[in-house]
Amino acid sequence: MAMPRDSMLGREDSQPEPVCGNAQIDSPLTSLPPELRLQILSELDLDQLSALVRASPAFHRDYRRSRRSTLTKCLQVTFRSVAVDACAAFQSSSDEFAEAWTRDKVTQFLHSYQDQRASAHNSHAIKHLTEDEAISMAAFHSSIVEPFARCYVDWALTNLFEETKGSLNNGLLSKAEETRVLRALYRFQLCCNLFGWGRFSASSWRKWRRDAFYDIDILKLFLCLFEPWEVEEIACIYAFAKEKLDQIFEDIRWDVHEENPKFEGQRPPTPVGAFHLDIRETRDELLEGTISRGLDLLHMLFSGVWDHAQLVLVMQAQIIFLPRGFLEGAAWSDIIQQELREEAPSHRDQKQERRDPLPFTGDGDSETDGPRPPLAWTVMWGGTYSNLFGDYVKHVIHRWGYVMWDAVRLERTGGKELLVRQLKEEWRDTDPRDVLD
C-alpha cells in the first residue's frame, strides 16, 4: 500500500530530518517538557500531525520515538465517530481476509462490527492497532480516502451550484458534513470488501463467485444496519463513482469493442480484453462489477494520470462482471426492499408504517447524539419516518449529494428549494410510501 502524503508518518527512519525554515520558530517548542510535546502530538489529526513533524525537528524526533501511540491517537482524532467504520474497512481489506473469505466469516464479521458500533467506546479497535497497522491505516486515509473525498465534494457541489446558479465559494465543510462524507466512503469500501470484488485475487475469485451473497443478503446483513439516510449517503458516493466510471467506459468504448481491428483473428468467441459497452444492460452490469473493486481502483482511475493507451490497458485488466448483483438494481432496488419488507418487517418498517415523527433537530453526529437526519431527509419525507432508499429515491438528487449537506448550506445555496422542486417533478405530489400501505 502506498505511504501517506507525508512519508515521515511511515518507517523511513533513515531519511534526513526536516529542517525548519526559521530555527527561532522551533525553540519554544523544543523547550517544552517531552511529555507536553507528546501530549500536543496526541491531540492532532493526521493532517496536523503531518504538518508539525515536517516543520519541527524536535516534534519529528518525538514522533519517531512514540510512533504507534501517537499515530493511533491521531487516528482517533481524525476519525471521531467514523472510527468503527474505518477499522472495519481496514480489517476487511487485507489479502489474508480475502483468502479466508467465507459467508460465515462475513456474517460473523458484521455481527462484531455492529456490536462495536453500538458500543460507547467506538475507538477501541484503533487503540489496539500495531504500529504497522496504524501506518497502513493512515496511508489509506491520506493517499486514497482524503483525495477521493475532495474529488467527490467538488463534483457534488459543482452539480448543486449548476442547478441553483449559485457560487462555488461556499466555505469549508462543517464537522457534520465531513463525518457524513467519510463514513459513506468507509462504508462503501467495507461493502466492496465484503460483497464486491474488493481485494479478491485470481486464486480466490472462483470460491467467491461460487459462494457470493445474493442481493437480498446484502440488504439484510449490511444496508439494514444503517438508518435510511445513511444508506443514501452511500448511494451518493455510488452515483459519483458510476458517473465518472461511465465516462471512462465511453472514452475507451471503441478500444475494447470486439470489432476493433486489433482483435482481428481472435473472434469468435469474444476476445480477451473486449467488452460489449454498446449494450446498456451489459454496460451497467460491468460498471457495477468494476465499481465493487473499491476506492483503490476508483481513485487511481479518477486521478487522471493515465494517457489513453495506459487507461485502456488498465481498464481491460479491471473491468469485471459481478455474478449476483451488488447495490444499484440489486440490494437497494425497490423490488428487493419490498421482498424483505414482506418477509421480515423491521422496526424501521414499522416506524414508517406509523409515520412516526422525525423532525429536523439540527446537524450533529448521529453516532453520539442518536439518529439525527439531515434537513434534506426531513424535508423530503415531511418530517415523518421513511425507510425507503436507493431506487426509491431519484438519481437526480444523488448527483448533488442531498443528504451530505448541513441546513446552513442548503439554505444558503438554495438546495432546499431545489430538492422540493426536483421531488415534485419526479413524484408528482405522490408519496412512495403510500403505494406500500
Image: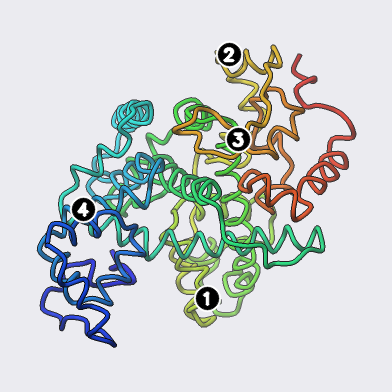
Residue 144 in picture, x, y percent from top left: 41, 62
Task: Please identify, in this view, whether the residue under mark 2 or under mark 3 is nearer the observer.
Answer: 3
Q: Earlier in the sequence, mark 4 or mark 1?
A: 4
Q: CA distance from mark 4 to mark 1?
A: 29 Å
Residue 89 in picture, x, y percent from top left: 36, 45
What residue is pinned by disc 2? 345
SS assignment at label 2: loop
What residue is pinned by disc 3? 229
Q: CA distance from mark 4 to mark 3?
A: 31 Å
Residue 191, numbered circle: none
* Residue occupying image coordinates x 67% and y 60%: 157
> Is residue 383 or residue 421 the one in the foreground?
383
Residue 304, numbered circle: 1
Amino acid tagged 4: Glu
Q: Earlier in the sequence, mark 4 or mark 3?
A: 4
Q: CA distance from mark 2 to mark 4?
A: 40 Å
Q: Earlier in the sequence, mark 2 or mark 1?
A: 1
Quadrant into which the N terminus falls: bottom left
Residue 301 in picture, x, y percent from top left: 49, 68
SS assignment at label 3: helix
> Is residue 197 or residue 429 the one in the foreground?
429
* Residue occupying image coordinates x 37% and y 34%: 211
Amino acid tagged 3: Trp
Corner quadrant of residue 280:
bottom right
Residue 182 in picture, x, y percent from top left: 47, 50
Q: Earlier in the sequence, mark 2 or mark 3?
A: 3
Q: CA distance from mark 2 to mark 3?
A: 18 Å
Q: CA distance from mark 2 to mark 1?
A: 45 Å
Task: Please identify, in this view, whether the residue under mark 4 or under mark 1 is nearer the observer.
Answer: 4
Query: Counting other residues with Cα less than 10 Å from the Cα at mark 4, is it few (<14), some (14-19), or many (20 or more)?
Result: some
Residue 133, numbered circle: 4
